[in-house]
Amino acid sequence: MRARRAGCGASIVPSVLETRGLTMTFGGVAAVDGVDFTLGRRELRCLIGPNGAGKSTFFKCLTGQLKPTAGEIRIGEEETTGWDPHAVARLGVGVKTQVPSVMDGLSVRENVWLSAYRGRGRAAARSATDAAIERLALGEIARALVGRLSHGERQRVELAIVVAAAPTLILLDEPAAGLTSEEVGRLAEIIVALNREAAIVIVEHDMQFIRTIASVITVFSQGRILVEGPVEDVMRDPRVRDVYLGRKG
Amino acid sequence: MSARPQLRGTFVALAAGAAILALAPLVAETYTLSVLVIYAILALSLGLIWGFGGILCFGQAAFYGLGAYTYAIAAINIGESTLPVLLGIAVPFAFAFVLGAVMFYGRLSDVYLGVVTLVVTLIFFRFMNATAGPAFAIGEARLGGFNGIPGFPILNVPGQPRWEIYDGAFYAVCAVALLLVYGLVRWLLASPFGRVAVAIRENEGRAELMGYDARLRKTVLFAVGGGIAGLAGVLYASWAEIVTPGLFSLAQSAEIIVWCIVGGLGTLAGPIIGAVVLGYAKFLLGQQSVIDNTLILGAILVLSVLLMPRGIAGVLGAAWGRAPRRARRPRRRAGAPRRLRSLDRA
Ligand SMILES: Nc1ncnc2c1ncn2[C@@H]1O[C@H](COP(=O)(O)OP(=O)(O)O)[C@@H](O)[C@H]1O
Ligand SMILES: [Mg+2]
């Protein structure tokens, strides 16, 4: 891992995340196209945009799952462009992927423990595991194999994995997809609570849900940032309507 | 998962294993039993990295042969067997570490990993076969090409080169080695290192998103498997009193894989049982000449895959009313349809 840049204290860097001209092309097609994105400390930002707009690809560039074709990423004080996922994760970045990514053959508790153990050691991992299981209300199914759980339960397991690592930057890719309205309500509470300790970027489609948690929205379209601003302004923006009604793709 | 029952389970398994190993000489000769125990250690080496690390190595025989050759060459040059034994473990360990690092840091896909390990084994086989001339010697030891290396000192009591270990005593050494390796592997799998290894097998991408360096961990696990296979090779060399390029053959590599499949992957008892059962079957078949051995072993493999998808250990585990821990299950693809339950237990 790279050394910290000298003399670059936290006070000089107000944002936890910044990208400059971030670009990811697949066979000549830019899925992410020159994105400049800045996220403040403790900010809760929503990312919206039609399917294929590049939101998930943007996340994958941030986590190191994809190596961007061009541009720069800074997380905290580190220039993380081109880093491997495990190195990015160690900076305190937690991600819930769009397609749930959990260890199906292991128990709920083992899944959460694995995340809690990293960078903590045994004694502290146990209490962090208990806390995350409690927080996501997984106590009753802690011993169950994750592969046997319902979709909503698996989503919660993945959130518990993220929570257990005590990240300072959390990326959530469509966490409410496929949840019951009751589950979505609980999710909103959890996200707001998490936001007291961490900055969060959340990809979501449900406008009702977005209104309850976020104040600022970034709209992606065709790999670029189309609009960015307070929820109400963005909702009124005709360009956003066009994109969602398919007039511009 | 608390440590206590795990520890008790390990002791029960070790005690049961020790009892079986102690009683076995009542039903078979220690000479035959020794080689079965050696096969069991070899099977355990692949059972560890494949069953728990998800690394399918088609070249486990490379480390086995390397351990055997290293022992033979070192024993000829040194005489006393203690250092040769240690070298016979250390050299395959180091070689597996380097090979593993190249493959895992190079992000080879599973298929290419199989191909590379297979090719490495073939290279050893070819090379050792081509070392007939006097130019191919390491110190006093001539590599001997196709004929291999005969006549090296066998195991001796540490520090006492004249007290050679053979027959019953050698069987005891092999038995203790198997118990030690089994205990070590159980301990390793119960440790955070082992738990993370299983996590990487289950979902490498998620393990990395948790902050684990999968490449490094797979490399270390692969090297441990190489070291254990090397130990099996050392014992085999001392048992056979000759090492030949056949140790590196594809048939040998394939046999180890078959032991693991028939015995039951994802368990530790499985590969051991598979190696002993098939090793003994091969020994019995070797005494007849009616049907070709390979044909029969192939039939056993096909039947066992069809009838016992979890291997012998799976059948035994089910019979005991308790499925083996972390039994092998078909991997579910991400996004595959799964049972939806709207009931929120929150
Ligand atoms: N691995 C990949 N290879 C090729 N094209 C990809 C890959 N991943 C995503 N894409 C393409 O990039 C575009 C953006 O996809 P994605 O980031 O998943 O969008 P969103 O998450 O906003 O729905 C899509 O056109 C998709 O087909
Ligand atoms: Mg997406």
Image: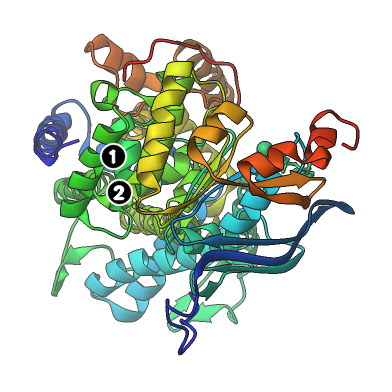
Q: Secondary structure at mark 2?
A: helix
Q: Ligand 2 closer than 8 Å to the CB at disc 1?
A: no
Residue A64: in sight, yes or no? no
Q: Chain of mark 1?
A: A
CA gap between label 1 and label 2 equals 9 Å
Instruction: Rate crowding at label 1 as few (under 14), some (14 to 19) or many (20 or more) other CA atoms within 10 Å.
Output: many
Amino acid type of the residue tagged 2 in the rendering: Ala
Residue at x 44%, y 27% (from the top left corner): A154
> Between disc 1 and disc 2, whose residue precedes?
2
Amino acid type of the residue tagged 1 in the rendering: Ala
User: As drawn, which residue projects farthest toward the bottom?
Assistant: A7
Quadrant that contains the C terminus of chain B: top left
Q: Quadrant of ligand 1?
A: top right
Q: Quadrant of residue B87?
A: bottom left
Image position, residue B28 (x, y; %):
22, 29
B87 relative to B261, above or below: below
Q: Chain of mark 2?
A: A
Residue B105: in sight, yes or no? yes
Instruction: Rate crowding at label 2 as few (under 14), some (14 to 19) or many (20 or more) other CA atoms within 10 Å.
Output: many
Q: Secondary structure at mark 1?
A: helix
Q: Do pointers 1 and 2 mark residues of a single chain?
A: yes
**The label number, if any, that marks residue A132 in the structure image:** 1
Q: Quadrant of residue B228?
A: bottom left
Q: Are marks 1 and 2 in contact (CB under 8 Å)?
A: yes
Residue linked to disc 2: A116
Q: Nearer the viewer, residue B302 or A189?
A: A189
